[in-house]
Amino acid sequence: MMKRVLSISLSSILSLALLAGGNSWTAEATTGQNLPTSLETAAKGKAPEWNGIPLNGLIPETASDATRIELENGMTKPIYSTDEAIIEELFVETEVDSDRDGKRDRVSIKVYRPKTEPGVKVPVIYEMSPYRSGILNVPVYNVDVELNPVKHPGNGNGRGGKPFALANGQAANLGSLGNYYVPRGYGVILAESIGTGKSDGCPTTGDQREILGTKAVIDWLNGRAKAYAGDGSEVSADWSTGNVGMTGTSYNGTLPNAVAATGVDGLKTIIPVAAISSWYDYYRANGAVIAPGGYQGEDTDNMAEAVLTRENPQACKNIIAELKAEQDRETGDYSEFWADRDYVKDAKNIEASVLVVHGLNDWNVKTKQFSQWWEALEENNVPRRLWLHQGGHSSPSGNNWPQLQNRWFDYYLYGIENGVMNEQAVDIQREDRTWTKEASWPAAGSAPTRLHLTGTGNGLGKLHLKPVPNQPHNKQTIIDDPMKRANTLIANPELNSSNRLAYMTPVLTDSVRLSGTPTVSIRASIDRPVANLTALLVDYSTSSPVIVSRGWMDPQNLQSDERSRSLAPGKDYTFEWDMEPKDYVFKAGHQIGIVLIASDYDYTIRPKAGTNINVIPTRSEITLPIVGGRNAFK
């Protein structure tokens, strides 16, 4: 794949008046000539504190008469009424003309902000979405088609939108974000992405046009863009500090990743939930055309069509056609089209902090999305935390999640020192739904551990810690049957099956934890120029087997996902690919299994049955990131 200090202004002097009773304080500022001891401390490089309220020095504006908040238990508390909230429907002018009508696109936004005293300014929590005006039922691709050998070189889980306008009689209902944060002294902006709802332009599924359309709202909050009311009058954001935090789930969480990767000034933090970091890895895997879980046949063009809810959608006909042509379902190769939608390669630009949230069982926005993003953040020294839960494609719950989110925004948007960055970086929910805190991810001590394959015929094979003797003439055959689902193919591994090869460890004498990305290396020949390759990592026990991870490959992408190359039928090649990253504990008494199949009914293209894949097990292996490495099996 393509390679993809703390400071504080002393110009204003802070005075925080301690309110009577409990642990509640009011932050208000007065001007004066003398430098408070707290800010003298800050000037010396230590965190300032006033009347027991610590500040982290990240947000100088908090030390001014523009701030009016109260704290309780270290968090902003509700002091403003939703009934008195100021609500504005505006249109922000962007830098792009995505529908090519000769005019800059304008994005529709709804602003919810507290009614404050004159001069008080508030930071903003911002969510951009393509789903606010619903999702259209559009056709997707038929996947029961033949694969392409190269010549030489809808509605569902996590996708639901809600109407942009509030129902009659619900003026005080500001939505989940507004109801929670407006009373605590935040503005909340809910916006419609380009080409959706009341916004101009065309949806472009995550590229620069969509990113700039989202970024424009942050620019407006910082005086770099214009916004207009319905009557055409210009409206400023003089009520805002210009400090912005973005959040959202799924597509709504993907756009914060994208905008953060621009390094836009004013975006202080993001909380992406179940978010995409590279659209290639959403719709492709190692050269193979792969569906997001639950949406077989979907691709960038019909995603854009599904959210194309603007007036006169015909204006986007050519844009949709370009997406269809450039996404390249024929080869599945990584190209400039996908590089334009790859935020990982631009992580070096990020200036915002990031709280990454993902479900370990998310098969829609798969776990590679958080894993590669987390790694890129680390490589670029981005302040970050990670929250991994046992759910699927969903927002988290439990373990004081609302409080963590509140503390996170308080820390980065108001500059309140609440210890949120002094805690361990990673929260992981275990299989029994308990939570643990860890310093890093993958877990400390996780080491690549090779398991070697042996087997004969179509019977159950074995996984070995020690290398096995090479038997190059001992081959096992998989006959592709794309209509058989993976859950069927992993069942009864002790029985012969022509459509899969299964290998298992001995029964585990102790629990074994996997933390990171499994990889597969298979020596095999294929009797046709093209096929699907799929590996399934399985937890076997006396109950039903569980697919822990899976991974896919187009064998034509032998050397790179950037370029397919033709294969000679019957020739042995070494095929290597990654599986989805996981954090999973195999219990004592269970067995770790690897099951090799060709097509994966719910994810891959499904060609006609009959392709033969001849595997040399003794020249094949799987590498698992095991905490404790080889010693974990002893």
Image: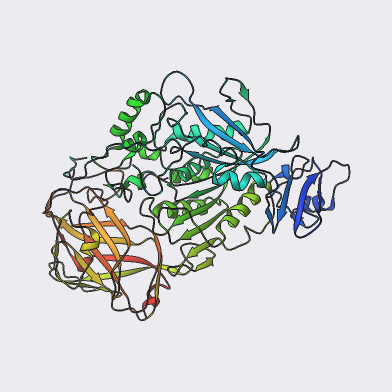
Residue closer to the observer: 600 or 515: 600
The quadrant in which residue 119 appears is top right
Identify whether 514 is placed above or below 372: below
Q: Is residue 435 left or right of residue 566?
A: right
Residue closer to the observer: 552 or 175: 175
The percent position of residue 254, horizontal first and vertical second, equals: 46, 44
What residue lies at 41% left-to-right and 51% top-to-bottom? 369
Residue located farthest toward the front when viewing the structure as drawn: 169
The percent position of residue 484, horizontal first and vertical second, equals: 18, 57
The percent position of residue 382, horizontal first and vertical second, equals: 56, 50
Identify whether 115 is placed above or below 588: above
The quadrant in which residue 246 appears is top right
The percent position of residue 441, horizontal first and vertical second, equals: 48, 62
Q: Quadrant of the C terminus?
A: bottom left
What residue lies at 13% left-to-right and 54% top-to-bottom? 611
Q: Is residue 379 left or right of residue 576?
A: right
Residue closer to the observer: 584 or 612: 584
Q: Is residue 551 left or right of residue 457?
A: right
Residue closer to the observer: 368 or 406: 406
